[in-house]
Image (spheres, rainbow, N blue to C red):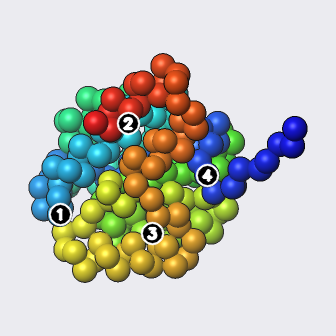
Amino acid sequence: MEKFLRHPKILNRHKSALLIIDIQERIINVMQNHTQLVENIIKLIKGFKILNIPIFYTEQYPKGLGPTVKQIKNELNGDAVKKLTFSCSGADNLFERLKNNNIEQIIVCGVESHVCVQQTVFDLLINNFQVNLAVNAVSSRFKVDYETAIKRMEKHGAEITTVESILFELLEVCGTPEFKGVSSLIK
């Protein structure tokens, strides 16, 4: 029986990681759809934990913007990667850590779409990572900034997708305990 290939853009849990960018207390409430944003990021976190996939998260200038919001921080293990640069490329050797762990596909979520998220996505792409942008888990203060950033990131090579699509790509099959756990998050 012939073995057929899978498309290389489909997420593979063995070479993926989640990157949560700057979901911090002093900025979250001015983001569009911030309640849904936080809920969707928590779905990603819980799904990645079920699938045992690495999760990284950053905080932009926490002295000014505060810590990661409590609902998200409560779901995470470890400390945030602190940064002053808008791009996560300047965040404490984060890109090097990703490469050293053989991570090739980065699922990106966070704020703001047109600043830290966009600059990070561009830097990930130029450093040969596949970027999957969860469009229902990123936001900006203004709709025009969000929409323009999504178009720009897609134009330059980011895979535009959603939380549910990401989780089911990583699952790959149904009928497993992992499937049951992840599918319960989607309902």
Q: Residue at x 26, y 29 (%)?
A: 74
Q: Residue furthest left?
A: 29
The label shown at residue 32 is: 1
- In the displayed structure, does residue 101 sit left or right of residue 3? left
Query: What residue is pinned by disc 4?
Result: 10
Q: CA distance from mark 3 to mark 2?
A: 22 Å
Q: Looking at the image, is mark 4 or mark 2 nearer the viewer?
A: 4
- The Cα–Cα distance between marks 1 and 3, rounded to whole angstroms, is 19 Å
Task: Give the Cα distance between marks 4 and 2.
Answer: 19 Å
Which numbered mark, 1 or 3, is in the foreground of this view? 1
Q: Earlier in the sequence, mark 4 or mark 2?
A: 4
Neighbor class of circle 1 (other Cα within 10 Å; few <14, some 14-19, many 20+) is some
- Which residue is farthest front? 1
**Residue flagged by tag 3: what amino acid is it?**
Gln
Compared with 19, 86 (above or below) is below
* Disc 2 residue type (three-letter): Ile
| Near-viewer residue (156 or 81) | 156
Marks 4 and 3: which is nearer the front?
4
Please tell me the numbered disc located at residue 119.
Answer: 3
Q: Is residue 48 above or below residue 175?
A: below
Is there CB contact under 8 Å for labels 3 and 2? no
